[in-house]
Amino acid sequence: MAGPGARARVGWYRRLYVWVLAGMVLGAVTGLVAPEVGKSLEILGDTFVSLLTMLLGPIIFCMVVGGIATVANLRQVGKVALRSIVYFEIVTTLALVLGLLVVNVVRPGEGMGVNAASLTVSHEVAERTAAGQSVRWTHYFTQLVPANIVHSFAEGAVLQILFFAVLFGVALAVIGEPGRPITRGIERLSHVLFTIVRFVTYAAPVGVFGAMAYTTGNFGAATIGALLRLIGTFYATSAVFVLVVLGSVLLLVGLNPLRTFRYFRSELLLAFGSSSSEVAVPGIVRKLENLGVSKGTAGISVSAGYSFNLDGTCIYLTLSSMFIAQALGIELSLGQQVLLLLVMLLSSKGTAGVTGGGFVMLTTTVSSLSLIPVSGVMLVFGIDRFMSECRAVVNTLGNAVAGLVIARWQRETTADQMTAIMSGRRAGVLAEPDADLAAPVAVRS
């Protein structure tokens, strides 16, 4: 018999992730059977992503400010930030090295014999290439400090919002009692924002349906052609990273990897269906809180990870850049590959606010060195959408795991407590946002 803290079992047809999965499958079928119809449904996916990303900046601000302002010892905030950066550097380096090893063994671009001069650059690719080539080393420092915080919120510049939120939260903590009403107001605002997220999440199946229908309708199944090997290599490498690297990290902090992945399944499906890791941020933060992770730790680790802990993007960068070199018949020495990896350590961070995401990061990496012609990015542009789905999933899961690791490092909760909540043997701090489509919007006492 279930204990008093256990949740009542909910029918499968009332679970959000089931409907998201159904929307994903139906969208893929629609795009393949009726491509023109699929293309016309892009608006559904784009609108859903916009609905969630419009809340991203305010949620990060409220979470970080509320978390820091309620911490009596500001050294604790510094520890969270420092430990997050250390963890991010270790894990992203492992992702880059893994991608480099795999691409040298599998060599998916070998034998293509493409002539760089024959590559024609479309207008869309030219715009993204220009964005990537305009990124210089100073960009990673100048983009940290917002010139206008209102503009940062409008543009969704996560790193700038995080910087301002940290300063705002520290200021509230320093002034003490006079700032308490502002802190309480921000906490109440965060409850309102997460309630909006819950409402918007109900539309997830429709949004994922539209995004998948557009992807398959626009690119089809047969257009992958010779690049199918690169896609397969990328997905396989990502799976190895998730199971081996992230799985080992979870075991080290006492958590069951499969149970943890299952706990974040709705966020992973949303990221996959929409090809965006942004849409999963509110859900990840909410579920970390549900496990007992403090607001400050959840807010700082996840929002900073959005710019500094993009594991899926790191794998994509190494595979794609080396694929381009192999396809063009360019043999890079070990020293040149190490140099490329060092550039990727920089180019894979802090560009979340740049239009084009992972593709812009790839262009930035290629254009930073004269080893590979920039026009070579045309080879992977056509399949970037298929790879972005996997990138989004790995980025999402990597940041969820980061939040758990930092919380355990901070001793905010125990592995047994989190395991009990994940398995349903114990009620969490907050109601799970995706457990039941009919569940009330409430915070448990």
Image: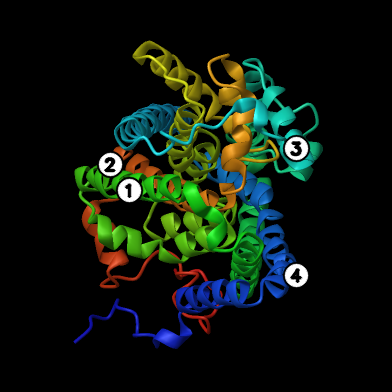
The residue nearer to you, when weighing 71 against 90, is: 90
Disc 1/disc 4 C-alpha distance (Å): 34 Å
Which residue is the site of mark 4?
Answer: 40
Q: How many marks?
A: 4
Label 1: state its secondary structure: helix
Q: Point out the tag, 1 or 3, that comes first from the N-terminus.
A: 3
Which residue is the site of mark 1?
Answer: 242
> Which label lies toward us, 2 or 3?
2
Label 4: state its secondary structure: helix
Q: Is residue 309 above or below residue 372?
A: below
Q: Point out the tag, 3 or 4, that comes first from the N-terminus.
A: 4
Q: Point out the tag, 1 or 4, that comes first from the N-terminus.
A: 4
Which residue is the site of mark 3?
Answer: 152
> Which of the numbered marks, if any, corresponds to residue 245?
2
Disc 3/disc 4 C-alpha distance (Å): 31 Å
State yes or no: discs 2 and 1 in contact (Cβ < 8 Å). yes
Quick check: 414 left or right of 60? left
Residue type pointed to by label 2: Val
Badge 2 crowding class, 10 Å Cα cut-off, few under 14, some 14 to 19, many 20 or more, is some
Badge 4 crowding class, 10 Å Cα cut-off, few under 14, some 14 to 19, many 20 or more, is some
Q: Quadrant of the C terminus?
A: bottom left
Q: Point out the tag, 4 or 2, that comes first from the N-terminus.
A: 4
Residue type pointed to by label 1: Val
